[in-house]
Each structure stands twice: as structure tokens, then as C-alpha cells.
Image: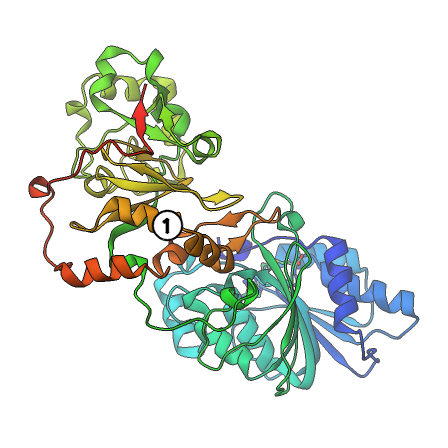
Amino acid sequence: MASMRGFVETPDYLVDLMVNRLFHDRRPSASDTLLDPGCGTGAFILGVLRWCDREGVHPPEIHGVDLDPEKLAAAKTLINGHGAVHLIERDFLLASESRYEYVIGNPPYVSISHLSENEKRSYRSAYRTARGRFDLYFLFFEEAIRQLKPSGRMVFVTPEKYLYVESARELRKLLASLDVEEIELVSEDAFAGRVTYPAVTSLVKRPTSRQTRFSNRTGELRELRFLTNGNPLLHQMNGGGEEQKDAPRLDEVCLRISAGVATGADSIFVKSSASLDRSLRLDAYPTVSGRQLSNAGEELRTSDVLLTPYDQTGSLRPLEELGALGEYLSQEEVRARLLLRSCVKRKPWYAFHETPPMRDILQPKILCKDISPAPRFWLDTQGSIVPRHTVYYLVPKPGVDIHQLAEHLSSEESCEWLARNCQRAANGFVRLQSSVLKRMPISDELVRQAAELDLWRVRDPSSTPYEQSNSAVLIGVI
Ligand SMILES: C[S@@+](CC[C@H](N)C(=O)[O-])C[C@H]1O[C@@H](n2cnc3c(N)ncnc32)[C@H](O)[C@@H]1O
């Protein structure tokens, strides 16, 4: 429902921090104007009024814009007829000629997959930041900057992702032309129950040669520079300089670097092999979760299995061909649980949340956990394990030596690179995302192998002689 789009209320402590930043070196006056785009129930408007009250200054003229009439009605009640406030029901992303000294807010975070084809088309033609898999908050940034007067200041809280995702390159280019004063990564649980990795960005609409003050969640301070080519800032955020271009990357020697299987109902599909009915064994693959990897030593063992209604090529098998598994899944309470998943609107009720690429999954591969204190990798040389969604897996291209790849990944050099380039969780743990793993530099030995191999040839898994060696790091099923 468009009117409910992206609603998340900002907690008062964060509002107050942002309002302080907005007015820190220039107090507002009654003749100034201030915009809160996507004002919702008015958290920032109330924060601005609170600040002005406390400081004994007359509030600026405040415009709160939102397209949700119910949120605006709630805001109206809370603001209680304050003369300086105007609540306006409209789509902020439709052009407006208004100009403001101040902008503050928490724009909606709505990924492109929730936009209609019409919306995508019209945003793409109106906004330079509507590129690739954009998010609505990129557009709010662009429009708010447009509506700022020269030398006006803006403070936004958004997901931090715009600092490094490829789809936000245009937004970073735009920011490179402005004085981005400060970026603070705030606590992951700032927004109750939502993990958005929030960042508070303060900028002034003027050119500058100054760098951006940056603080991460562990309180370390750095200086960043938005680059005119829009290059991602993750490397700088983690203390490195600008990244070396064109170095051979991990995805050039891997067939696949992906998160494991998301069933949407692990309680139904994941079972302990000990308690598994014999008749279900045929469709059960050994499986591991991220949690199991965290607790594992050198040698990983699992007794869990994933009941899989897919064949080895990744096609969903017809229910009537599933035999005992079909009967299990069709039990009333099991089926009801599966029907609760959002994905069943677009696919058969007994399918996994995401279609598992079984052909690739069932290959010798390397596994790692999505979030961990330091990067660690395990080998599955048999290719028998089906990793779940909190585990990433890397399948080497045919001919690439999996042991050499594992050795490279576990090297000190790689660990340092990952520590510099991965996003951090609040507790300082590294988040090993596939986008980062893919652009990891590879060792000279792997570069040499890649050069020797014809890596573009079409792969035929049945003819590939997969090594069944007894590696030092073994994954097995009890
Ligand atoms: C993340 S919420 C933030 C609400 C409020 N600013 C706060 O911090 O508590 C984003 C708000 O943007 C509104 N919104 C979404 N798309 C919009 C659009 N195109 N124009 C105006 N408001 C929009 C939603 O209705 C929602 O109230």
C-alpha cells in the first residue's frame, strides 16, 4: 500500500542529536524555512520545536510533507496547532519550487522491488540517482538537496548502504560536489526491531575541498572523501586509502559466491538426521547454519539435514512425485505454516523462499559465516553440504584448485583485506557479504591458474572430475 510506504518512526534521542547538528553553528530565525520530507507523525517537527523552546528562539517556518493522510492527522494532533508548522499532504518526489534554509528528516527506505513499473519509469526520467537497483531514499536525498537554498544545511538519517553500494554511485557523485560535513554511523538498534545500519549525514549546499568527518559504530574517527567518480567509500571507512582498480578478483575464479539457501521455514525443512524417518532420507541433504559454523572447530560436523523438494538441477519436483516428503509437507499444520510465508504468493506453497541453485550448491565449495569476529573458511570437498542463508559459499570454477583457494582466503593478507573492506556490525564483527567477497583480490598463484585455464568454457558438471581428497579441514556428517 503506497500510503504506508517505508514508515519507521525516529526515536527522540536520535531526533535531538540530529536537530543539534542542524543548528550547531547557525540558530534559526522566524524568517527561515525548514523542510521535513516524509515527516510521518512529526518526530522531527516536534524535535525542532523542542530545541527552539529550550534555546528560547523563535522557530523557523516548518513544512512537513508526507503522502500518508493518517500519519499527517496523527502529526497534527501532536503538534497541536503550532503556528509555525504547515503539514502538507503530497508526494515529495513530484517537483516543487519551494526552497529551504534547513532540511531534516528520515526519508522512506523502499527498495526498487517494491515500486511499480510506472513509478520506476517516472523516477528514472526525473532523478539522476534513480539508477540500477536504487532505493527511494536516494531520490529523497537528491530532491532535498535541490530544495535546499545555497549554503543551506541538511541532516538525514538513512541506511549507511548508500556509502558503498554500486546503485548509489550517482548519489555519491552528487555528494562529491557538496560540503558533506559529517557522517556518523549510529547504533544498529536505533530503530526498534529493524536492522538498517543507520547513518546520520550532515551536509551544507556549497562546494568545498574539506573532507568528511566520519565516525563508525565503535567510535573510531576518520576522514572520508566522496570521489567525483562515485567510487564506494567502504575501503576509506575501514581505514584504507582509495582502492586499486582492475586487480584480478575472486569472482573471476569462482563459479558462484552466494548466500546459502533460504527456505523461509527452517523449522519445517531442517531436521536432525537422528530423528529422521527413514522414508525421508532420500530427499535429505546435510546442512549447516551460520550458528553451527560459529561453534565449529577445525573440523565441522553436522547432524542436521535439509529436506529438499528440488531435484539436483534445482527444479522443484511435482508434489505427487515427492513420496514421503510430499506426505510430510502436506500435513495440515505443516502446510498451514508454509502458507504463511510471503513468497507463496508467487510460487508453489511447498517451494523454498528462494529457488536453490542445486547444481552449483552440490559442488566442492568453501563456506563461511555471514557475520563473525574474524573471517574463517571451511572446506566442503565432497560438495555434499547445503549451506543455509546465514552461510556464504564459494564454488571455484572448474580447474581452479579449491585447496589453493581456501589457503588464499585464510591467508593473513586476505583477512586484512576483508577487515578493511567489510561492513561492521555494532559489536565490531565483520559482515562477509557476497558483493565484497566477489571483488576481493586473488593471490598470484590463482591469477596464474586463471590465466592458464579457459574459464569461459560451458560447464558440464557430469564430466568434471571433482576431487574427493581427505583435506585437513573436513566437513562430514555423523
Ligand atoms: C521512514 S518514515 C519517517 C517518518 C518520520 N520522518 C520519522 O522520522 O518518524 C518515512 C515517511 O515517508 C513517507 N513517504 C513515503 N513516500 C513518500 C513520498 N513519495 N512523499 C512524501 N512522503 C513519503 C511515509 O509515509 C513515511 O511517513
Residue at 56% in and 72% down: 141
When the figure is inspected, residue 346 is found, relative to residue 234, above or below; the finding is above
- The quadrant in which the C terminus is found is top left
Foreground: 351 or 160?
A: 160
Foreground: 207 or 28?
A: 207
Please tell me in which quadrant of the rendered image residue 96 appears: bottom right
Q: Position of residue 192 (x, y in %)?
A: 65, 45
Foreground: 88 or 162?
A: 162
Q: Position of residue 451 (x, y in %)?
A: 18, 63
When the figure is inspected, residue 20 is found, relative to residue 75, above or below; the finding is below
In the displayed image of the protein, which residue is found farthest to the right?
56
* Apparent side of residue 58 relative to residue 324 in the rendered image (left or right): right
Q: How is the image coloured?
A: rainbow
When the figure is inspected, residue 324 is found, relative to residue 116, above or below; the finding is above
Q: Position of residue 242 (x, y in %)?
A: 48, 73
Mark 1 is surrounded, within 10 Å at the Cα level, by few (under 14), some (14 to 19) or many (20 or more) other residues, namely many
Label 1 secondary element: helix
* Apparent side of residue 64 relative to residue 373 in the rendered image (left or right): right
Q: Is residue 354 visible?
A: no
Residue at 30% in and 43% down: 346
Q: Position of residue 427 (x, y in %)?
A: 62, 46
Residue at 18% in and 18% down: 323
Q: Which residue is mark 1?
A: 409
Q: Is residue 184 visible?
A: yes
Mark 1: which amino acid? Leu
Please tell me in which quadrant of the rendered image residue 88 appears: bottom right
